[in-house]
């Protein structure tokens, strides 16, 4: 990956829907050259996908939280299957420390969060923090 690839990625982080033609103009390359570089970055796994970020203004009671989970080794696979199949789970990290995993969730209400916690607690111990506000949500930068 060279400096031009980094510039392309930085522009795409700012706006993943930026037209190739616009990226090409900003970095002084041809559109086919930019398309080729983007395709190579995708094939190499550097660009892992594209997504839409939803802020859900129509659901003001949405509850977001971070759940720290400590599972026994014999329950880890079952836990991972649970979180992968749960639409309220946004992210699941394997972490060091007292807990094995940290899970970020976004539930439609406190009752749904409680229900999810009850399901997770059948597989291990939890510690939950409810997110009150997000003061910084920065995309990955190079």
Image: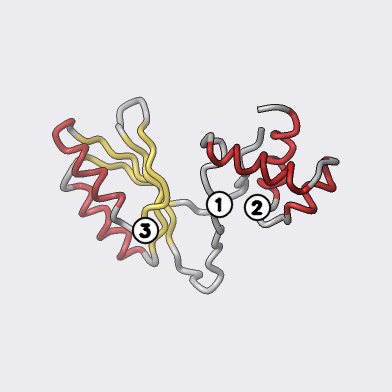
Q: Residue furthest front?
A: 32
Nearest to N terminus: mark 1 or mark 3 = 1
Colour treatment of the image: secondary structure
Please name the residue that numbered disc 2 is placed on.
Answer: 16
| Depicted 55 relative to depicted 94: above or below | below
Farthest residue in the bottom direction? 58
Query: Tag 3 or tag 2, which sits nearer the N-term?
Result: 2
Report crowding for label 2: few under 14, some 14 to 19, many 20 or more residues within 10 A (C-alpha): some
Q: Does the CB distance between marks 2 and 3 fall below 8 Å?
A: no
Residue 139 appears at what percent x and percent y? Answer: 62, 44
Other residues around mark 3 within 10 Å, as few (<14) / some (14–19) / many (≥20): some
Which label sits in the foreground, 1 or 3?
1
Q: Tell me how far mark 2 sits from mark 3, CA to CA.
A: 24 Å
Q: Secondary structure at mark 2?
A: loop
- Towards the viewer: 122 or 82: 82
User: Relative to the observer, which residue lies in front, 139 or 39?
Assistant: 39
What is the distance, in whole Å, between disc 2 and disc 1 at their CAs? Answer: 7 Å
Q: Is residue 57 left or right of residue 98?
A: right
Where does the image place residue 59, in percent across and percent down from the top left?
A: 49, 71
Disc 1: which residue:
50
Is label 2 in contact with label 1 (beta carbons under 8 Å)? yes
- Asked if marks 1 and 3 touch (Cβ < 8 Å), the reply is no
Secondary structure of the residue carrying tag 3 is loop
Which label belongs to residue 23?
none
Please provide percent x and percent y for residue 12: 68, 47
Disc 1 is placed on an element classified as loop
Write down the residue under mark 3: 88
């Amino acid at each position: 990956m060279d400096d031009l690839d980094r510039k392309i990625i930085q522009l795409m982080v700012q706006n993943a829907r930026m037209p190739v033609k616009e990226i090409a103009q900003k970095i002084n390359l041809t559109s086919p050259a930019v398309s080729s570089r983007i395709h190579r970055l995708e094939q190499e796994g550097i660009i892992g996908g594209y997504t839409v970020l939803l802020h859900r203004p129509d659901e003001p009671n949405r509850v977001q939280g971070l759940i720290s989970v400590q599972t026994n080794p014999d329950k880890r696979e079952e836990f991972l299957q649970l979180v992968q199949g749960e639409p309220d789970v946004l992210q699941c990290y394997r972490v060091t420390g007292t807990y094995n995993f940290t899970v970020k969730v976004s539930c439609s209400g406190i009752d749904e969060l409680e229900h999810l916690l009850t399901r997770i607690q059948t597989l291990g111990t939890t510690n939950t923090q409810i997110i009150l506000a997000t003061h910084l949500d920065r995309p990955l930068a190079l």
